[in-house]
Image (cartoon, rainbow, N blue to C red):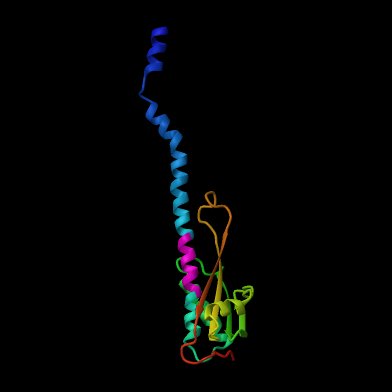
Amino acid sequence: MIRLLRAFLKSQRGVAVVEFAIILPMMAMLFLGTFEASRAVRAKMKASNAAQTIADLIAAQNSVSSADLVNYCNGAKAVMAPFSGTTLKAAIASVTNGVVDWHDESCGGASAIASPTSIATSLSNGAGNSVIIVQTTYTYSSLLVYVLPASITMTQTAFGRPRNIDTIPKT
């Protein structure tokens, strides 16, 4: 009986299976965590592209209306593909010589840009140029809720300078 017990304790046949069973959950979490982190980074890049798209579209116009801004917002939501664009919000401001010409928060109910005049002043370096400031907010929700249970809110800011005229009016 003691001989069988010693033979059983010295046996190495099941060690690899036991080690694999111990390491498998950690490896799966590392793999899924890397997948989810890369999706979050991609969503942040898409939100940045959406903000720059709105700024570029406005900067290329001679004037904008509220309907135009809604269309630009819808275009930015399309830029978010393959992610859902429903949580994308944008606030837009036009600043000339340190004065806010107009601002719009109708794109998804975004909150106003905090201190757009100081942002424009730091961009123009005292040159007094007109600047279009777009700030997007995107709420990213994970596909794998057990890896990343909370949603992440990403804020991106983009700038554009009017191309055709000095200041873009809003009608």
- Answer left or right for 4 relative to 87: left
Q: Is residue 32 above or below residue 161?
A: above
Image quarter hosting the C terminus:
bottom right
Q: Residue 154: x percent and y percent?
A: 55, 64
Most common secondary structure along the magenta stretch: helix
Q: Give the range drawn in magenta.
A: 41-51
Which residue does the image show at 57% across and 52% down from the upper left? 149
Which quarter of the image is occupied by the N terminus?
top left
Above-or-below relation of 52 to 65: above
Residue placed at 41% from the left, 34% from the top? Answer: 20
Magenta stretch containing residue 30, yes or no? no
Instruction: Compare residues 170 and 159 and report the one nearer the observer.
Output: 159
Location of residue 93 (image quadrant):
bottom right
Residue 45 in picture, x, y percent from top left: 46, 66
Could you tell me residue 53's position as x and y percent? Answer: 47, 77
- Residue 1 shows up from this direction: no
Instruction: Indicate the position of residue 120 as horizontal and vertical percent values.
Output: 57, 79
Q: Is residue 43 magenta?
A: yes
Q: Which residue is drawn at 37% across and 14% down?
A: 7
Q: In this view, does 76 lie to the left or right of 4?
A: right
Query: Of 26 and 155, which appears nearest the observer?
Result: 155
Residue 26 in view of the camera: yes
